[in-house]
Amino acid sequence: MDMDNEDFKVPIKEKKKAYEVDFTSLSQTAIEKMMDSELEHIAGIFGVDRDTAALLLRHLQWNKERLIEKYMDNASSVSIDAGISSPSTSTSSPTIPSAPGPSRRTTSRSSTKVLGPSPSTSKQRRTPPPAKKYTPSATSFTCHICFDDSPSLKTRALGCEHTFCLGCWVDYLGSRIRDEQELVIPCMAESCALRAPDSFVRAILVPDAGSPEAKSMTPEEKAAGQKLWERFGELGVRDFVGANKALKYCPYPACTNTVSCPSASTKASLTRIVPIVTCGARGIPQTSQSPSSSSSSPALNPYAAGGGSSDNTTLDTAASKEHVYCFGCPVESDHRPVVCGVARMWLKKCADDSETANWIKSNTKECPICQSTIEKNGGCNHMTCKKCKHEFCWVCMGPWTEHGTQWYSCNRYEEKAGIDARDQQSQSRASLERYLHYYNRWANHEQSSKLSLDLYAKTEKKMESLQSSSALTWIEVQFMRKAVDQAVRCRRTLQWTYAMGYFLENDNMKELFEANQRDLERSVEELSELLEGPVPVDKEGIGVLRQKVTDKTVYVQMRNEVMLEDTANGLVEGRWKWNAPVEGFSYEEDGDVDVLP
Amino acid sequence: MDARLRRVNKEIADCKNDTTSNIKIELVGDTPFHLKGSFPGPEGTPYEGGHFEVDIVIPEQYPFSPVKMKFMTKVYHPNVSSASGAICLDILKDAWSPVLTLKSTLISLQSLLCSPEPNDPQDAEVAKHYTTSKASFEETAAYWTQIYAGGPGKKTSSANSAPVRDEIAMAGLERAHVDQFEALGFERTKVIEVLRRLNYRGANVASISEDKVVEELLR
Ligand SMILES: [Zn+2]
Ligand SMILES: [Zn+2]
Ligand SMILES: [Zn+2]
Ligand SMILES: [Zn+2]
Ligand SMILES: [Zn+2]
Ligand SMILES: [Zn+2]
């Protein structure tokens, strides 16, 4: 397909970073234009109308080359398969309902007549069907679906002349399009494989204004028809997008945008890049809300779809966020820096081992010194026992003092020495322990993100009251929001670095990777700690906190850039070696991993 | 009136007025959307003489989505689940057309009894039985017709008492085979279940070792 047509490109941003991919966002209208030019092309080559071209292209999944080849080889056979024409001699003639016979669908393929939507420019002549099965006679017609026989009954039929009343066609189209999400609309007669062309569907659902059909429709019927016709258009776009590897439909509910990302259209490309894209839209269409800068009470409601009165400004993670998704896989979130294949393996591993790992998700742990129960209530891992004042790390349960300077081995799984390799039991225990090390940290960052957002909701109230009591502007209290935003973003990166770390071969490259991970993790924890500390009550105190938080936010952002840049460069350079087979990567006999060409 | 209701009512009335076919449709409750269909088993088949009842549910989208049907009478047939009565028939799924009616669909069920399609089975065990030994299959199907569908049977037992269910005949197995393994100390029901699962019939008997059967019995 011709994707290079400049007319359709709406550049979102220039590529500037190693961890970003080039992509363009396309509206439904833009995709429809692309489809149109494909239709024009085929209609021109074959000398058929656009309806016929559409049925042909959809039948062959928009593969123009294959269609041309097959059509040149045997046009009538392709036309039958695509539901454009009927076989001329059919042993399974559609049964008349008043004399039904026991029936199983049989298909017979023989010579054909073109009965379908008449190709206006074609040399082919439309021949009358062998028998008029349901054709209304001037005297009486009974619709064989609803049994209505009133003389004023309006009827419709495809080229096969299997005639039914208009009301039944409307109901049938509704059932196909709305309930079954089907673009293909076969004739209602039994064993008739003819398919309704777009113009036929359109004339029923949205008849031309001024036509007798349009005049006899109630406003409700018109609205329902319009809605179905729009849905039909969407299904057409989805069909086209689904057939093209360089396109992907936005997975967010009710969004009709598409992203074009040719650089991520092959399996091999997914070993070198992590194609995180955005369709350009935000939020959920029905409840879309525009951030209002004039609001003095920005509330936080990260997972609600809106509706609240003060719910008009939200964080990056909130309902009004951009539609971010992965072009290369079904994961609906930003899984950088890890490649799709590894992300998939990690999620599968987590799903398989979910029960073993469940206890880690629990929000309570025991103090390593006095064993009293401690509940985690913020994103920070620096825990202080209320009873004995012991300070420790939530993740590794080690004393916090050692983390302060070195973050010692909190991000790194030390392969325990002295494991008897032949001892099956200790080996499987070791492998479980290893998994839990990574899973623990993965789950912790996810949990910390949520808790940070919860905590921010509380902090924000404090900031609001502060704003009124200490003459700070709304802008001046925004640093907290930005910091939480950044912390959440970095924790998402950290989360996926643990997925990556789990599958990385132990080598020098992994050590460098872990050094970056450690730096990012430490700075995020420091930022979280600042955010969770007491909020000063005076203007001076706020000023000091603001400076500290702002500086830390900038630093954290820088560490995140380093982490993402380095891992992305490593992918392109083939620097990362996996300890398990990953889809798309090939393995040589000596165990080296190479990227397929 | 609602189009679906009008159509179903007309279908029911048409079926009543039609004296030539032997298909019956009756109401189950107050609405015509839950019905009971019935027809006699086709002549010249193991189902001959039986009376077969079908549960019919008219879906909201009828006639644009297919009617839901399942056998209420137990049937021994490759395309009907021997446990649930679920039916594997194309017109009840993808090949449904809104011009098909309840009557024409019931006629299709009747004709399905004449011509099983073991390659597209609903009940794999029954289908295996059918392909291994058609004669033995037909004997079992006729026995089921006698037990469940009020069929004539062989009239060997004394006339007035209801037929006693013979579990071995129900499973389509040979009495000698069941006796053979029962003699080893296994329970009869267990033996029947295993032999049925292994399709211990006809030519298969030679290819399934006694050890294999015992192994399965011990599981
Ligand atoms: Zn037709
Ligand atoms: Zn009608
Ligand atoms: Zn979107
Ligand atoms: Zn992905
Ligand atoms: Zn303690
Ligand atoms: Zn730690």
Image (cartoon, helix red, strand yellow):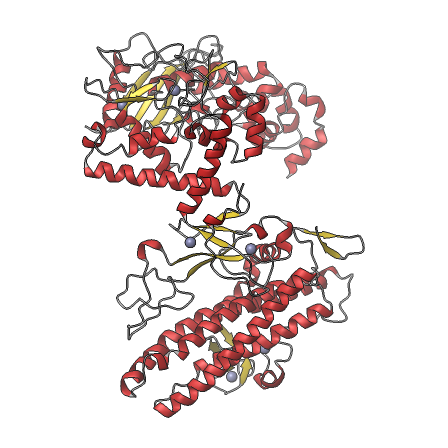
Q: Position of residue B193 (x, y in %)?
A: 57, 30
Residue at point 65% right, 66% down?
A: A434
Q: Specify the quadrant that holds the N terminus of chain A.
A: top right
**Image location (x, y in percent) of residue A392:** 55, 82
Residue B201, above or below A549: above
Determine the image quadrant of residue A504: bottom right
Q: Is residue A290 left or right of residue A585?
A: left
Residue A386, visible in the rendered structure: no
Q: Camera-side residue: A315 or A264?
A: A264
Q: Nearer the viewer, residue B165 or B137?
A: B137
Q: Is residue A593 visible?
A: yes
Q: Is residue B42 above or below residue A5?
A: above
Coordinates of residue A227 in the picture (x, y in percent): 30, 41
Query: Where is ligand 6, by quadrant?
Result: bottom right
Residue in view at x 39 percent, y 51 percent: A255
Q: As displayed, is residue A91 above or below residue B197?
A: above
- Horizontal side, residue A129 vs residue B17: left or right: right
Residue at x 47% of width, y 40% of height = A240
* A79 to A425, vertically: above or below: above
Total marks placed: 0
The image quadrant that residue A453 belongs to is: bottom left
Q: Is residue A532 left or right of residue A513?
A: left
